Image: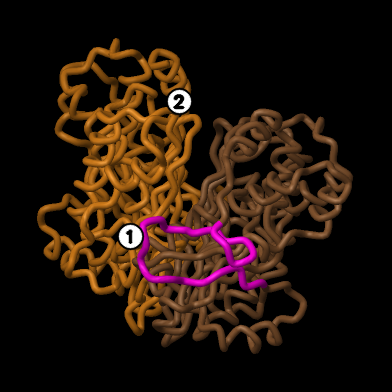
Chain colours: A brown, B orange
Amino acid sequence: MSLSEFDVIKKYFCRDVSTEDSTVVLGIGDDCAILDVPEGHQLLISTDTLVAGIHFFEDVDAYRLGYKALAVNLSDLSAMGAEPKWISLAITLPNVDADWLARFSNGFFDLAAKHNVTLIGGDTTKGPLSITVSVQGIVPKNTALLRSQAKVGDIICVSGSLGDGALGLAYQLSNKSLKLANAQAFVDKLELTDPRVKLGLLLRGMAHSCIDISDGLTQDLTHILNASHCCAQIDVETLPLSEALQQELDLGNIKGEQALHYALTGGDDYELLFTLPEEMFGSLQQSIPELRLTAVGKVIAPQASKIQLTKHKKAFSLTLSGWDHFKKDGE
Amino acid sequence: MSLSEFDVIKKYFCRDVSTEDSTVVLGIGDDCAILDVPEGHQLLISTDTLVAGIHFFEDVDAYRLGYKALAVNLSDLSAMGAEPKWISLAITLPNVDADWLARFSNGFFDLAAKHNVTLIGGDTTKGPLSITVSVQGIVPKNTALLRSQAKVGDIICVSGSLGDGALGLAYQLSNKSLKLANAQAFVDKLELTDPRVKLGLLLRGMAHSCIDISDGLTQDLTHILNASHCCAQIDVETLPLSEALQQELDLGNIKGEQALHYALTGGDDYELLFTLPEEMFGSLQQSIPELRLTAVGKVIAPQASKIQLTKHKKAFSLTLSGWDHFKKDGE
């Protein structure tokens, strides 16, 4: 490295701490950061690693990489209803590329500023490109949203639309060969998704359970169902698709069954999936009118299969062959 | 990977949380961990990354790697007088090797158990071997030991002995060709050093400033001096050498000047370096009789050079040629 570790930290990562954040007693510059957790609150911590070639393309735009490294962690805090406060960033770089670092840090700090979070420490090392972000947030005591408290009778809801992130990834994996009218919209959802921080805060005291959709609706819902010892019925007709995905359907670029697979099993949407009593849904929607919220099913008593799909109130099964075929096309 | 991420976490990293630790409200298994910071305390956070081929040899024993990944972070907490509480572990593995994971997690958890810290989360990913540990500790409000509060007139002290870790590294880098009677002792200091947690706790309310020696006495002392706007005088005659290093000197395997260089500039000792009023030194020594503590100099008013070396009360200068020559031998 032409710049030392200290130089890199100072030049790209020591940005002014918001003077309004009195919880940061000491930021970057000593052996540890010192933080004040407000009285009556609990601390929440989540950590995610993004490895080049595994979680992102080596040539991804550095601004988007910096943004996403933080976004996926803020999404975890949102899934528990936490207010994001502080971030540690451990970044391993093969070399010091000033332009890359400037873009990466801009993406990272733009999202940090939007959600009032402060970078309080980390580590800069040399090696294969990899980024580990650890975020810390707070909730008033005993108000965190858990996976384990879903109740039979709850409705199951999701924010935003489903499947776009996975379609963006399929487009990238196909080396942009997929015929899509809205390719950039899907790639933007994959790389620049906005974590649902405000929704997470609203869900405290309202939702019984919550998780973020990083691995696809069915896989993430299964985590809730296993932790809560119950099952779910999902009405595939209600799954919210974006205008962009609907347009691809209308144009015949995507088949209906493929769209369903994206919505049910696609990862990288970073929407929230939550359960709550049906009577609360209306007031929740009114609290956050700018965000599309959709009821997609309900929590039911334990059954033989964890998730039952329905369509027009009838049992519905989806063959996986179409999906596998499409996946091969996309790889 | 033959085992999934969830399998690896469950099999190797979900060990019983100490039932005595009521601060862990929720550990591994949801989007975030939930933690209670005791009232009247502040939270301290530090993060370190170890990259294969950069911070450790690719073939290092996995037990020692797991141990050291945690040790270097606990050392940062100790340098600020914090009581270690919780750990997040982000580990990137090229493949799932059951034996390697068992040894790694044993080393990690053995040290964690010794210091009563709980693994509360993290991430397991595929890619080039790399380990990022983030530790969280607590101190009663406003008692953390800072780098910035050294006072003119303070004596400068170190724990343990200096230079052994660096000599262990030189031995490894030389492919074990260095002629040393105590090679294993130096390698053990490099790989299995015990972080000075108890000393850090004792230094609260006593030391004015503190840092851990990870990059060598002179470099780490300079961080204190810069942050505290003062200078230092170090008496090279007082630098504490281990019995093993003293024996190498007696045997003629190491020259006196080389030993001095190791003690002054060698990293990887993870001893504490601190400043305090001279009259407190006696009672501090009595509080922790099992640990060698040595006064090696004093804090002085700003001068032209940050660190002045003395020997028998006379100015002393050390030529760097011997060191460079030796470094070449060792590489």
Note whether residue B164 is visible. no
Find residue B319 and report its horizontal and vertical position in percent: 46, 26
Q: Residues within 10 Å of mark 2 (few under 14, many from 20)?
A: some
Q: Residues within 10 Å of mark 1 (few under 14, many from 20)?
A: many
Mark 2 residue element:
loop
Q: Main secondary structure of the magenta part?
A: strand
For residue A204, above or below residue A157: below
Note whether residue A201 is visible. yes
Q: Chain of mark 2?
A: B
What range of the chain is rendered magenta? Answer: A294-315
Res A278 label: none
Q: Residue at x 68, y 32 (%)?
A: A58
Magenta includes B113?
A: no
Q: Which residue is mark 1?
A: B155
Res B53 label: 2
Image quarter in which the N terminus of chain B is found: top left
Q: What's the amino acid at mark 1?
A: Ile
Cα gap from disc 1 to disc 2, whole angstroms = 38 Å
Find residue A329 and report its horizontal and vertical position in percent: 70, 29
Magenta includes A302?
A: yes
Q: Residue furthest front?
A: A314
Q: What's the amino acid at mark 2?
A: Gly
Q: Quadrant of residue A62?
A: top right
Of the two numbered discs 1 and 2 on the same chain, state the one appearing first in sequence. Answer: 2
Q: Can marks 1 and 2 be said to lie on one chain?
A: yes
Mark 1 residue element:
strand
Marks 1 and 2: which is nearer the front?
A: 2
A180 and A1: which is toward the camera: A180
Q: Residue at x 56, y 31 (%)?
A: A128
Q: Residue at x 43, y 86 (%)?
A: A39
Find residue A139 and report its horizontal and vertical position in percent: 48, 79
For residue B61, above or below residue A142: above
